[in-house]
Amino acid sequence: MRFTVVDLFNKKKQRQKITMLTAYDYPFAHLVDEAGIDMILVGDSLSMVIQGKETTLPVTMDEMIYHTKIVVNATKRAMVVADMPFMSYQISVQEAVRNAGRFVKEAGAHAVKLEGGREILPQIKAITESEIPVVGHLGLTPQAILRMGGYRLQGKLPEQANRIKEDAVSLQEAGAVAVVLEVIPSELAKEITESLQIPTIGIGAGPYCDGQVLVIHDLLGLFEKFTPKFVKRYINLREEVLNAIKQYKEEVEKGIFPGPEHSF
């Protein structure tokens, strides 16, 4: 049985933590699903961790749809949330609805995620009215990296904090089914979580959110460029993979592999 919006709300009511991870391909999506993670985010972070770009901005709708389709096909249980990439919803409400619809029709996504607050309320309302669940995203919003001037803590100043709080309530009123809170002070996240009926999912927002999300490549130690403070690296898979590849290279060069057991 798929994890649904109803399950999402029930977990909030029952004070059970919601788990979310990113995935972008069949092997990882299959593993994340098998592990029983509630929600999989096909994040625009694939621009960085899969395509090697400097920011999340370059990834396109077609690329996002391609990866979302793979993740949906790889899973049976998790709710798959597709990240709407930069400029896929900012231009107009009509464009936002059309692109959200593409994620559902072409890729089989179960929800879409949009970054921003008051400036995108008409889009969230229209997508929701088109029967597509929307997850909001406040705090550090990577698509606004040029305006923000880097990946910095948001909501530290009182006026910033108030804006985020107001936006969270507005997203709920517009029909969002959950909101991601990224890189904001723990106490602010706690306040928002307690004030909303919809779940909050934190990433660098402390322990008080209703759930947590991480980029799987960060969790597994596969992304070498930088590791944010909020990431817990559960294994250094990059080192293990690198050692295995080096061993393969050495065995081929020395004539050890393939051995008799690998030959016909």
Image (cartoon, helix red, strand yellow):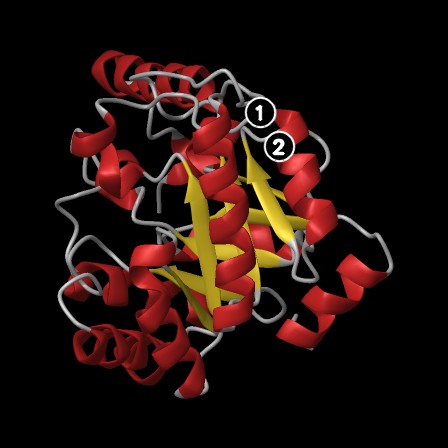
Residue matched to label 1: 185
In the rendered image, residue 207, in percent from the top left (x then y), is placed at 71, 31
Q: Amino acid at mark 1?
A: Pro
Q: Quadrant of the N terminus?
A: bottom right
Asked if the residue under mark 1 is in contact with the one under mark 2, i.e. CB atoms within 8 Å, the reply is yes
- Badge 2, how many Cα within 10 Å: few under 14, some, many 20+? some
* Amino acid type, label 2: Leu
53, above or below 102, in the image: above
Please tell me in which quadrant of the rendered image residue 87 appears.
Answer: bottom left
Crowding around mark 1 (Cα neighbors within 10 Å: few <14, some 14 to 19, many 20+) is some
Q: CA distance from mark 2 to mark 1?
A: 5 Å
Residue 114 place in picture, x, y as percent: 36, 58
Task: Note whether residue 29 is visible.
Answer: no
Residue 185 versus residue 81 in the image, above or below: above
Name the foreground residue: 52 vs 209: 209
Decide if residue 154 is in sight here: yes
Residue 47 occupies which quadrant of the picture?
top left
Report the front residue among 176 and 59. Answer: 176
Q: Which residue: 66% across, 49% down?
A: 19
